[in-house]
Each structure stands twice: as structure tokens, then as C-alpha cells.
Image (cartoon, rainbow, N blue to C red):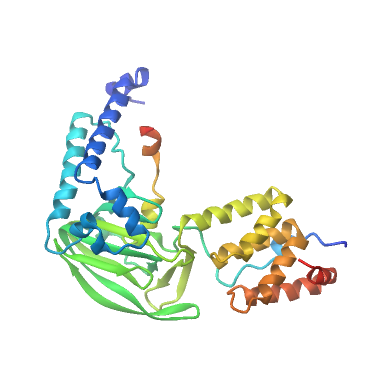
Amino acid sequence: MQIRPELDALRRDDTPQRQAQARLVEDLARWRAGPAAPLDTELARFGDGAELDDLPLLSALFAPGETAAEDFAAELVARFVAALERDPLGQVPLRHYTDDLVTTLMLARNARSTLTLQALDGTGLARRAAPVSAGFPPSEAIERVLAGSAHGEVMSIVAARPGGADLSSAELHLRAGDVHRRDGSREALILRSVAGSLVTLKLQRRTASNAVTHEYRLADGALVHQAAGNPRDSRLELTAALLGRMGRTDAAPLLAAMAEETGSPALRWQALRECLALDSAAGFAALSQLARRGEDPLCGPAGALRAQLIETYPQLAGVASCPA
Amino acid sequence: MNLPKIDISALPDLDTLTGVFGSLAHPAQSLQSDDSIVVLMVFVYDIIIT
């Protein structure tokens, strides 16, 4: 194995790397204290549902015809490029990702919104197979093209139907300076070709907290996948499963309460299953509650499962008649 | 009351299953339009700088 001398030196003493990292963090802090000073506050307000027009920095960044976005991104990139020339082994202290298609720098984030700088490589895109599906996450996206151009289409949900959706498509050409805004739960952007690289500044916020991401097949609109629309639901579902595998019967009341809350139906159903397996009395009481709620999306499945369980275990019928 | 112990594998799922946040049936083409990929990116930087 070959180890370059500069890396070998760092294995004995990593002080230079720590110092390089501290300098990069300082560069970022200066940008955050300068042109990006209002960013965190405005991003939090945007995530909470504020109108873009009420947020001076963000509205300037996404105003068609203005050059604020170019200047804003260029200043940060110039700082990092200079820092990496000085310290080539430094790590940019922002979350980032890169592959042959997309390179992303997350400039700022809070619980429900993100601002990212993204570059899409046209050659990488051409190498990928044509998309067969489109994802519709419960989020709103505003994209500003900083450089480059692209050709693609916006897929829109015309009508939802059981097991799928009717989709329509409209051509879209993106050029430097364009601003494209879409409701991700109804519209998806699919890029077909990019000339060179397409650099965009992208502002996103998650909308309805209980909604899920739908993925529909482009050919016929069939629902091919559905996923939690936010990380919290998935975290809670995994936690509920873990409590179940650990046999934590003391968690049954909490799981029953989760099942009866007004959260994502998928999460509530998993909490109910875990609860029933841990403590059949607590779980069956929650199940009976749900089966009585006509407006609840889980009412039907809960009624069917309740009937099935009573048939298998007649003694459970007594639980329902106990005062809760 | 003698209540049964119910095996979780005997309890049905909903008709449409819901995957974890960020999961996709065809992930290769969907990188462009969703922030979930960004949210799920590796977080090494947070460890390095703190």
C-alpha cells in the first residue's frame, strides 16, 4: 500500500489538519456573519410557512432578473475554493454529496427547510437510464438557475385514483436567471438533458406533516412506492419496532397513545401492531377505539382486524366491554 | 382474564406499505428533485468540525 508523505505525516501528528479545518470553519463563519447573516432566521420563518415576499434575503435570491443569488453563491464558493487551495486536504464544513451526476452543498437548513447549491452534470445525466418514475414529496421547491441550461418536463398530477394517479407532462426549458417554483406533492421536475453543467440554488420546505411521498410510474401513473414524508415518522416507526423486539411491555400504553394520535396513518398502524403484540389488552382497546372512529383513515382496517382477532381469540371480546 | 399473546407476524399491514423517509423504488433517476437525498447525505462533516 502506498501512503503519500503528507498523509503519512498527518498520521503521526494531525495538528495541521485540525488547524486547516479550523480555518475552513472560520471562513464559513465569516460568510454566515456577512452576506448570509439573515439566512438562518429567514429559513426558519420560511419553514414555518412565511411567504417568500416577507423574507428580504430569500426573496432577493429567488427574484427573477436579479443577480443577488449569483453574488451570494459566488462569494461562498470563492471562499471555499481559496481555502482548499491553501489546505487541499480540508473538508468543506457543510453537508455535501457528489457523484457523477449531482453535486450538492447544503448551505443552511432547519427542521423543515433547506437551502442548497447544486450542480448537475450533463454528461452524467446522459449516461443514466431514462427515468421510469417520478417522486412527489410533500414539499415545496423554488429553484433558481445560476448557470447553464437544461431541457426537461414537469410531470403534474391531474387526478389521484386508487393505486395511482393520472399524470400530464409539460416541456420545460431552464436557462440562467430562470426561477422555477413547484408544489412537490403535485408536480415533479424531470430533466432530460443538460448542456454542460446546470448550477441551481434550491430552496425547499416540507409541507403537511403527515403526508407521504408518492412515486408514480411515468408510463401509466401506477403507484410504485410510497415513503414517509419526513424523517421523524420513520424514526418513530423504527423506535416502535425496536421496543417491540425488546419485549418492552411497559411501552404498550405509549404505543397505544401513538396509534390513537392524529399522525401519519402508516406510523400509527405500526404502533398499533407493536402494541397488540406486546400487550393484547392495551392493543385491543386501542384497536377498538380506532374501529369506532368513522372519520379516521384507519377505521376500516381497524374494524377488519378487530373482527379477525375476535374470531381467532373470542376472549378478546371481553376487553372491549371493559371500561377504558 | 386469560388474554392471548398475539404474534406480530399474524397482524396484517395496511394495503399500501410506507417505506422509510427517502426510500424510492427507482432511486437512480430521482436525485434531482427531492430534498430527502440531501437530508440523508453522510454527516461526516459534523463529526470532523466538532
In this orientation, which residue lies closer to the viewer: A33 or B9? A33
The percent position of residue A237, horizontal first and vertical second, equals: 57, 56
Looking at the image, the residue that sits furthest to the right is B1
Work out which quarter of the rendered image holds the C terminus of chain A and state it. bottom right
The percent position of residue A141, horizontal first and vertical second, equals: 30, 63
Q: State whether residue A196 appears in this view.
A: no
Q: State whether residue A292 appears in this view.
A: yes
* Placement of A232 over or under A85, stated as above or below: below
Q: Is residue A268 left or right of residue A157?
A: right
| Residue at point 20%, 33% (across, down) | A83
The percent position of residue A236, horizontal first and vertical second, equals: 56, 54
The percent position of residue A47, horizontal first and vertical second, equals: 36, 58
Q: Is residue A254 left or right of residue A95?
A: right
Looking at the image, the residue that sits furthest to the front is A54
Looking at the image, the residue that sits furthest to the top is A12
* Placement of A16 over or under A311, stated as above or below: above
| Residue at point 26%, 62% (across, down) | A52
| Residue at point 63%, 50% (across, down) | A242
Q: Is residue B43 left or right of residue A65?
A: right
* Placement of A293 over or under A27, stated as above or below: below
